[in-house]
Amino acid sequence: MNRTSRTSRLRLVVIQALVVALFATLLARLYYVQVVDGDAYTAAAASQSVREVVQQPARGLIVDAQGRPLVTNRMSWRISVDRTVLGSLEERDQRRVLRRVSRAVDVPVRRMRAALVDCGTEDAVEDRCWNGSPYQPVPVATGVKERVALSVLEQPEDYPAVVADQVNVRAYPRPYGVNLAHVLGYLSPITGEEYDRAEEDGDQSVNGTSVIGRAGVEKEYDAWLRGMPGHTSVAVDSRGRVLGEGEAVPAQAGDTLVTSIDAKVQGIAERQLHATITRARGTFDEVTGRNYEADSGAVVVMEAKTGRLVALASQPTYDPSVWVGGITQRQLKRLYSEQAGMPLLSRATQGQFAPGSTWKPFMTAGALSNGYSTDTQLNCSSDFQVGNRAFHNYESAAYGNISFAQALQVSCNTFFYRVGYDFWARYGTDVDDVKAKDPLVTTAKRFGFGERTGVDLPEEATGRIADRKWKRSYYESQKDYYCKLAEDEGSDFLHRFAEEFCIEGYAYRAGDAVNFAIGQGDTLVTPLQLTRAYAALSNGGTLYEPRIGRAVVSGDGTVLRKIKPAKVGRVKVDKGAIDYIDEALQGTTRTGTLAWKFTDFPLDDVHVRGKTGSAEVYGKQSTSWVASYDENYVVVMMVSQGGTGSGTSGDAVRSIWEALYGVQDGAENDERAAIPGVTPPESLPTFTKDGAIMPPGRKDEDR
């Protein structure tokens, strides 16, 4: 055997050895996988072949205090695209299907393609991508016409990969024509961050395709209303195609929220507010030489003894159903538009306005608790001089020396100017002392102004107490801007103001004090804050956190949670002062600024007290206020840039009182009281086994 042959044989032996070693390794590995670790791999393979498809629950109902439905659910046709089936088609067939669906449901193809992309991937578009399971069809249109859905079902050959089914969406029955948009709120799809956070917290009530509350009670009570999703197990092959269905866990419907809102009172409040704004816009303002703008308004009706809200109306408003099935960019833009009046903003809880003369009862409480007496007499002159400026009356003429009660009834500004100036002269002349004693500021804070009321609605505004600390803080934040503006040439008001502000904008002067005493200047309140404070006058000094929710009830009628009135505390002022103010304000509707609007009203039977206000803000028309109350309710109306208090809002406030007590109700052509029994219901609606909801009885079980 030559040398070449020996070399070839050696190579063959080496190759054979390598092949044997390779097969030995493969056999060993196969033994390990199938025998040693077989169970683990079998389980893993099984888990990869079974997936869960989510079934969304029906969201809970929202009803009023009488059991009338405010928000329900209805069935709506939905068009979805099965991505697995779509992916099995040729590219041109995919385009053809999507174009056909686009024409049928009027959704652009690019929007559908964005919806079909999984969130978290590189091509995902925020708020349009798919958060749900990859093994269930992706919704591309909700609320489609029935004929479109039926054509998809009847012509599957023309719509491969397209699914038509029915789902629950929100519906608004609108009893008594109510709108109630700012109270009810709206829903929108869960975000990726919210879903991740829910997973971290172990919250199984949401999933990638959930919708959650974004505003109003839909947001505040979302955890109760959303229910618990169900799921169906489906078997899929290695390509992700569904092979069959397995175990199913049904979805659990959300719970019902019973509110303290009375739909009949709410409807009357909304109509009166709308009519008042419309009338004001047609009324000439002699001060500005044009009609009132009446750009917004609010009405609040509250139970004085509990803080529960009976009605909460705000203008401008919007149709809450605009969110159902997805809102368009154009619709969303309008909701945030200043030109449209920013309809999403609730003027009752988020709007902040100078309170005007409705502030004076609380200034009276502060004065009577700090040295003044019910026998005090001060001059109600036509003006009051502070430095080189004369501060004038607005709604009242000169009355000479009068008492606090008379000053409230005729709404005398100069009377309260003198009170504010007196406290400033005694305690506050040192402009560097931001902690100077101020009984009027202290009293305002005790009545809850300058902080949130704690109402069970999100995004409530705080209002503002324009005291020394606030003025110093505001100066520090704005001085650079105004000092720079003051350096520019100019003699108009803005430049003169900038020069003065730059030099001493931090100083709390006598003018600030007298303006504070009549609810003018930089102090701001929300209509809800003012309503709660008047409720404290009615009930003897107790401050409540306002409440809309009364109870949460399960589908079988079980009361899961009673939402009790929440006391914040008692106002720390003399009880005698509150009693004195209460009696004085009865005169406002009999002989004072509201008397001409309450002619022939049965005040001996329905003891309405009241206070009017016309708040002046630089560059704007007067804001109209009427605050009123009796032993059971508080009714407050505000119309921004709407004119005088009683002149603009008096008629509407009277109409609401007439409706509450059934004095007369021309708008409803019904002389019965809006609330059965006149006083607030003491028990919850009755939930029967067949799903019906009956009005509450009169049992003393819920107070």
Image (tube, rainbow, N blue to C red):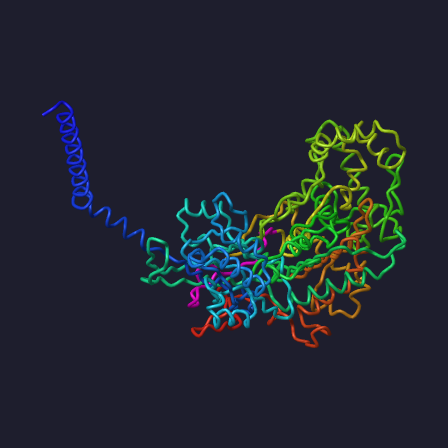
Residue 549 place in picture, x, y as percent: 54, 58
The answer to whether residue 531 is visible is: no
**Residue at the spot 44% in from the left edge and 66% down from the top edge:** 555
Instruction: Classify 196 as above or below 76.
Output: above
Stretch in magenta = 542-562
**Residue at the spot 72% in from the left edge and 60% down from the top edge:** 609
245 vs 5, nearest the viewer: 5
Q: Is residue 215 left or right of residue 167?
A: right
Residue 477 place in picture, x, y as percent: 70, 32
> Is residue 555 found inside the magenta-colored segment of the image?
yes
Instruction: Classify 305 as above or below 690.
Output: above
Q: Main secondary structure of the magenta part?
A: strand
Residue 356 place in picture, x, y as percent: 77, 49
> Going by the picture, which residue comes out furthest to the front?
2
Q: Quadrant of residue 437?
A: top right
Question: Count the marks: how many?
Answer: 0
